[in-house]
Amino acid sequence: MTTLQVGDEGYPACLRQIHDPPARLFVQGRLPAEEMIAIVGSRRATPYGLRVAYRLAADLSQCGVVVVSGLARGVDAAAHRGALSGPTPTVAVMATGLDRIYPPEHADLAAQIARTGALVTEAPDGTPPLPSRFPVRNRIICGLSKGVVVVEAAARSGALITANMAGREGREVFAVPGSIENPLTEGTHALIDDGAKLVRDVDDILEEFPTLARVHARARTYASARADRYAHARADSGPQETALRDVWELLDLDIPRHHDEVATQLGITAAELNRRITVLEMGNYIIGDAGGLRRRGPAS
Amino acid sequence: MGGTVLARALCGTLFGLDGVRIDVEADIGPGLPAFHIVGLADRALQEARERVKIAINNSGVDFPGQKVTVNLAPAQLPKEGCGFDLAIAVAILSASGKGHLPDGAAWLGELGLDGSVRRVRGVLPIAAHLTRSGATQFYVPRDNMAEARLGTPHPVHGVRDLQELVAHWESGNSLAADAPAPGGSVAPPEPAYDLADVRGQATARRALEIAAAGAHHILLIGPPGAGKTLLARALPSILPPLPPAESLEVTAIASCVGLLPPGSGLLVEPPFRAPHHNISAAGLIGGGGAVPRAGEITRAHRGVLFLDEVTEFRRDALEALRQPLEDGRVAVARVGGHAVFPGRFILVAAANPCACGFAGESGRCRCTPLDRQRYQARLSGPIRDRIDLQVLVPRLPAAELLGASAAAESSAVVRSRVLAARGRQEARRPIGPLNGALTGAQLRRDARLDDPGHALLEAAADRLHLTGRAIHRVLRVARTIADLEGVENVDSTHLAEALQYRDPA
């Protein structure tokens, strides 16, 4: 563990510019020197939100951008995991002391992050997860980042507060759109309405930083690999065989359907459906889990 | 009276599920009037003194006004219960001058104060054991005659009360030896639950059919009210009737634990047991005091053990299921010795998907992923490892519940397919086991795969991270699916279906 005072050489320059930079930072691991972008969002994100957070973070990591987030459940964890799937380290800003990983089930994730990137906090060792610590933590997330991407946030949520803070500090604000029926898009759609940049893929983010030549060069070489990776998300990417396609077409990316529903709609037996499902699973077309059957999206 | 008079009567009791021979000796000697029972008798047996004394007095015979001592041999074996009353009474009557007891006669029954002879437990296995150890005729309560006849080929006399017995003795009046026995076996009752009552649930019905055909354990996961209990209760209705040997075994167990209806003969329907989730480990697998008692797994032997809300069961109780799930029996050691109880049953476990029960229903579940993990962990790996089939039972849309869907197949139709599949298994392995209990080595012979099958299983093991045990589960289920289809070779279509009944977590 290292301690950085606000005057130290290694103290992030970006963070020094906000109006109340933390006097000292506790760091476990190594704080990367590359440009950072934050990805934040709901702790109770939908599968769609988790997928998008993972995918954007993975792409940013491929392009050499450090993803910053808050180690929380939901979008935060998906963003860290996405970033870890690429070559660039990721940074987790915590509201607790370095010895108190919260939530506890993210202990492994935190250890993985610290191996190449860093865990950062303003709170001394032993600080428990106090509600008052979280907004304070959010200001560090903004301070470290050139921009903040919000993936699913309810009205008046912590992620929304972070985004508004970022706006005041002159950082770029991005928001991922979603379904208007999902309450977790109220915040993101409100941000877009207020002038936040709408994000469809990583290029929408990188566009706002034309001076990052190194990042853009990497983004170009990575473009074709990216297209392949997301092929499954497109509507024309299903299985070719009719029997399998019939099943695949009835499934959604987000909302799981139970076997019986699909079998009834196709007029086939449970035995026959189960046979087809295995083949579809083996072909990476669908996912079956405790909730039911879904189409497989990228990175899920 | 000068010297002492001694009489012996043959009796029996249970140790675990086995009959044990007990010799009842009565001695009437000089001394102040007294009545002692010796030979490791428990509380209920000590009270036999009062019952026997009053019953004899109320039967028109005077209880001897001398020192009466009754010994139960072998003396070191702990004895309990009321089944010795009749033997004690006849031994005393004989010693007090009513003459010799008939040769080779065994006496079983409890006495009421009016001298009536009441039914006792375990008559079938006790009669069978005493026959092997030399008894040649049996005096039993009338309600136990039918089961006694299942246990012995020798004459069985039904005794209504002591008076009748005394008259039989003195004047040769006949007892109910030839009274019409209530049938060799009871006609199978209409099953109370039928698969036709289960609406929708095509996947769960299919899994239940596979479970019945191969005797596989099954886990039903679904929200409250989805119909898991109804499915479980319908399982006995699609199981084959018990073959004669198993029927006798099940009847003997029912007799020992007091589950046999009065006057009942052979039971032919597989048993169904659904213990409540607060049951102790001893209650579930057997245990108890000095004399070991059979638990629920033994009551469910050759039938179905249903554990509803399985995650609510005590952890030690669930862990105790490991041995019976593996071996089909359980060994219980107690002060008086060591008993082995059979327990080969189909386990049907039902669980909610998470603590609140609504996982998978968008918006209704309030559990965090950690909550869900903890909840799932309550059903430990070693138990899950022994459950071949796991299915999700969803809550049905209202339209289906109201009967909009076509009428479902009845149990009778499904049972005929199960019977055919069992037939194929018996042809392959005449002495068993059924598919649900095949070991890895046996599977290599019985579920040999062709090349596409091999390729599929290998790919699935890789992609779905299947462990060795999981692969065996898939092969066992695939074997049963092939048997249901009526084909000898397990191919990739069977495997493909079987792979869907694996752990959905």
Image (cartoon, rainbow, N blue to C red):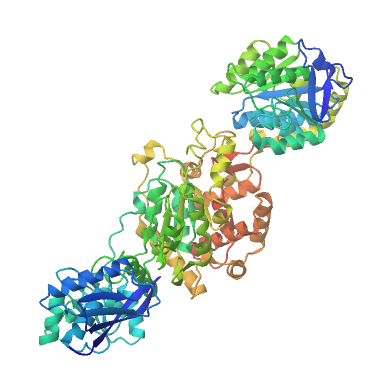
* Furthest residue in direction right, as rendered: A9
What residue is shown at x 12% (from left), y 78% (from top)?
B61
Whether residue B413 is visible: no
Residue A149 in the figure: left or right of residue B167: right
Q: Quadrant of residue B418?
A: bottom left
B328 displayed left or right of B440: left
Residue A209 at what x, y percent from top left?
81, 17
Query: Which one is in front, A37 or B323?
Result: B323
Q: Position of residue A168 (x, y in %)?
A: 72, 9
Q: Is residue B83 left or right of residue A25?
A: left
Q: How many marks?
A: 0
In this rendering, the answer to whether B211 lies above or below A138 is below
The x and y percentages for residue B370 are 59, 38
Q: Quadrant of the C terminus of chain B?
A: top right
The quadrant of the image that shows the N terminus of chain B is bottom left
Q: Residue at x 85, y 25 (%)?
A: A34
Q: Is residue A86 above or below residue A156?
A: below
A141 or A102, nearer to the observer: A102
Q: Quadrant of residue A300?
A: top right
- The foreground one among B330 and B289 is B289
When the figure is inspected, residue A294 is found, relative to residue B5, above or below; the finding is above
Name the residue rendered at 65%, 35% in the picture.
Answer: A104
Q: Nearer the viewer, residue B235 or A261?
A: B235
- Residue B327 visible in image: yes
Residue A99 horizontal/vertical position (percent): 72, 32
